[in-house]
Image (cartoon, rainbow, N blue to C red):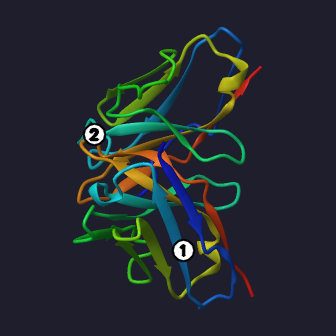
């Protein structure tokens, strides 16, 4: 079965950096585009970033453009999110999610990892 | 990239039907038949229940159905059950490989 396991969350000071990882299993990772989606405490879901199956192109929400970088290593079945210049408003649970090709939506989610930006 | 508009909360009694609306713009919901809906129980990851506006993934109850008219998509849950109590989110493709979510609706089963 599809499994997505995020890691790398924690407490970080404003302005610092953090890298999240998502280990994928149960499907052919190299065939699938992937997303990062976040959810601030007590708030709704916010789409963050998207990367094509081969890493050839990536796309971002305006709120993170220029600060966050999505990448992948298909040899390791792992998705990444490099987060720089972190702000308090970036505090959220970050979910790794699989793209359902052809239907332009997300079909599987990880359990999420909490990032807290605080001094 | 403004969030889609959903009611903050809806409620219904067991056995009843409820509908949750999701209003976007001509740049997202109105331009594509690519609205999906997710169910999220407290402390859990979201679960896909509707995609492409009206389709159900395998294993999702046929009590869940979706529709769309112009810039508004809707999720209907019929025969409400206690286990349906959760948060529900719509999501639309918004073009140029970007997506937008709704603000979420809390469903209370009375």
Q: What residue is drawn where x is 37% and y is 34%?
A: B51
Q: Are marks 1 and 2 in contact (CB under 8 Å)?
A: no
Image height check: is A60 above or below A95? below
Going by the image, does B107 lie left or right of B91? right
Image height check: is A64 above or below A109? below
Image height check: is A63 above or below B21? below
Going by the image, does B21 lie left or right of B86? left
Task: Give the residue at mark 2.
Answer: B30
Going by the image, does A86 lie left or right of B108? left
Task: Give the residue at mark 1.
Answer: A20
Q: Is residue B104 visible?
A: yes
Measured as percent of width and height from the top left, residue A77 is found at: 41, 65
Q: What residue is drawn where x is 59% and y is 73%?
A: A90
Q: Chain of mark 2?
A: B
Measured as percent of width and height from the top left, residue B65 is found at: 44, 20
Going by the image, does B58 lie left or right of A12? left
């Amino acid at each position: 079965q599809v499994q997505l396991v995020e890691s790398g969350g924690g407490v970080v000071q404003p302005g610092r950096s953090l890298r999240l990882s998502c280990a994928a299993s149960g499907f052919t990772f190299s065939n699938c585009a992937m997303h990062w989606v976040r959810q601030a405490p007590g708030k709704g879901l916010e789409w963050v970033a998207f990367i094509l199956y081969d890493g050839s192109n990536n796309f971002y929400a305006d709120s993170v453009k220029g600060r966050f970088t999505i990448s992948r290593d298909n040899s390791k079945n792992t998705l990444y999110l490099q987060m720089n210049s972190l702000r308090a408003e970036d505090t959220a649970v970050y979910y790794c999610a699989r793209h359902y090709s052809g239907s332009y939506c997300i079909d599987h989610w990880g359990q999420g990892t909490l990032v807290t930006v605080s001094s | 990239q403004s969030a889609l508009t959903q009611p903050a909360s809806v409620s219904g009694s067991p056995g009843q039907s409820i509908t949750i609306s999701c209003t976007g713009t001509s740049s997202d919901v109105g331009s594509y038949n690519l609205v999906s809906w997710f169910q999220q129980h407290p402390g859990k990851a979201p679960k896909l229940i509707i995609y492409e506006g009206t389709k159900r993934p395998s294993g999702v109850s046929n009590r869940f159905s979706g529709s769309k008219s112009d810039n508004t998509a809707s999720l209907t849950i019929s025969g409400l059950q206690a286990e349906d109590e959760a948060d529900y989110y719509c999501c639309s493709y918004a073009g140029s490989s970007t997506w937008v979510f709704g603000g979420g609706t809390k469903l209370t089963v009375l």
